[in-house]
Image (cartoon, rainbow, N blue to C red):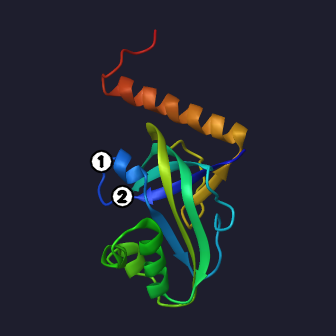
């Protein structure tokens, strides 16, 4: 079973994604189909990777709940669809900075929400590759190794900050 990694851009580095925010919804709008459109499904595990400049941290493990993948004829259609499936005001969705920068053309929409499973607060280990569209997938072994490396980095951070006594 694979696990997805989604890079979630933060507006500041002061806070990680909260439990309320971890539930989403999230959306991507692309001119052509990109990963994981058509692959991500309800019940899939996703690690949220909070991104702020050079400071990336796994904030949550979530389980995808509602997942919508479709072609839309315009940005307005994408906004209307997102608002309808997630019960949001269209003005809220239309005001999203990510959607604001998108061209008003025929596009592929991936929209999803999630159920938070576990708060992580783990640093991104070196070598973890994320696609240019902010997604990655990890197999079982790679998931285990990535999370183990992240946990070791977190322990080193705690020791360096004096929050945990050094190992003998």
Give the class, few, some or many, for how many residues have Cα within 10 Å of label 1's Cα (few <14, many ≥20). few
The percent position of residue 84, horizontal first and vertical second, equals: 44, 73
Left or right of 160, for residue 68: right
Q: Which quarter shows the N terminus?
A: top right
Residue that appears at 37% across and 23% down:
159
Q: Secondary structure at mark 1?
A: loop
Residue behind mark 2: 10
Left or right, 36 with respect to 48, comes to right
Q: Residue at x 48, y 77 (%)?
A: 81
User: Up-down: is 130 above or below 119?
Assistant: below
**Which corner quadrant of the image does residue 88 belong to?**
bottom left
Horizontal and vertical percent position of residue 3: 64, 47
- Residue 158 drawn above or below residue 80: above
- Towards the viewer: 5 or 52: 5
Question: Quick check: can you spot residue 32?
Answer: yes
Q: Secondary structure at mark 2?
A: loop
Determine whether 132 is above or below 136 in the image.
below
Confirm or deny contact between disc 2 and disc 1 (CB under 8 A).
yes
For the residue carrying disc 2, how many other residues have a C-alpha within 10 Å: few (<14), some (14-19), or many (20+)?
some
Question: Which residue corresponds to the image point at 44% horizontal and 31% vertical from the top-left?
Answer: 154
Which disc is residue 15 wearing? 1
């Amino acid at each position: 079973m694979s696990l997805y990694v989604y890079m979630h851009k933060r507006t500041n580095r002061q806070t990680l994604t909260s439990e309320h925010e971890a539930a989403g919804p999230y959306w991507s709008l692309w001119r052509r189909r990109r990963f994981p459109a058509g692959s991500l499904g309800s019940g899939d595990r996703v690690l949220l990777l909070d991104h702020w400049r050079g400071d990336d941290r796994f904030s949550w493990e979530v389980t995808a709940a509602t997942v919508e993948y479709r072609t839309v004829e315009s940005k307005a259609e994408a906004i209307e669809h997102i608002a309808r499936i997630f019960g949001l005001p269209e003005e809220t969705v239309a005001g999203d900075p990510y959607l604001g920068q998108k061209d008003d053309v025929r596009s592929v929409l991936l929209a999803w929400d999630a159920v938070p499973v576990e708060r992580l607060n783990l640093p991104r280990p070196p070598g973890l590759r994320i696609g240019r569209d902010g997604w990655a997938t990890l197999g079982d072994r790679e998931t285990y190794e990535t999370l183990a490396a992240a946990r070791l980095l977190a322990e080193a951070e705690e020791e360096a900050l004096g929050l945990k006594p050094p190992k003998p």
